[in-house]
Amino acid sequence: MDGVPAGPQEPGGEDVTADRLRLEDVRFYGHHGVSTAERTVGVWFSVDAELTVDLTSAAVSDDLACAVDYGQVARRIVEIGTHGRVNLIERLAGQIAQALLREFPAEEVRVRVRKLTPPLQGLVGTPSVELTRRRG
């Protein structure tokens, strides 16, 4: 791919980079949803994010400047989740995925958004969506 440094290669020259930065269970309280209660009172959300990114330099150098700072990734997820309102968790997941691709050097991101306290009229369950988006 143009402008993207190649990762480690097999002796035959094949790219074998399968590095991933994962954040699991980043939680925030947001006002997303269709019901009046969700939009006014709010609900808890949990986000898992996986960024496909070459971590070779960080693994070799032990230097944060060569890594993707997962604290910054988590803060960005929380910022998106706590500002503004959307009706659907699909839209929220899309906003997070696009921001992570735009702001971090990932080739691909996978985002899972779970609504932890949904209004299910007495039923029990945790709805979630998972989106995968690639650069380009």
Image (tube, helix red, strand yellow):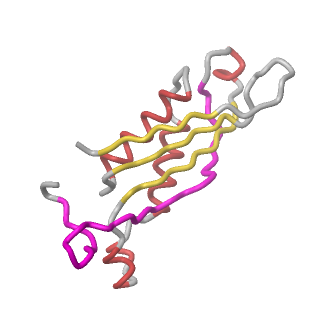
Q: State which quarter of the image contains the N terminus.
A: bottom left
Residue furthest to the front: 12
Question: Which stretch appears magenta?
Answer: 4-32
Give the camera-side residue of 80 and 111.
111
Q: Residue at x 30, y 57 (%)?
A: 105
Q: Is residue 120 left or right of residue 102?
A: right
Q: Is residue 128 left or right of residue 10?
A: right
Location of residue 35 with respect to 101 vertically, above or below: above
Q: Residue at x 40, y 66 (%)?
A: 19
Residue furthest to the left: 2
- Does the magenta-highlighted stretch encompass residue 27? yes
Horizontal and vertical percent position of residue 11: 23, 79
Location of residue 9 with respect to 113 vertically, above or below: below
- Does the magenta-highlighted stretch encompass residue 119? no
Q: Is residue 79 left or right of residue 10?
A: right
Q: Residue at x 50, y 29 (%)?
A: 84
Horizontal and vertical percent position of residue 114: 63, 38
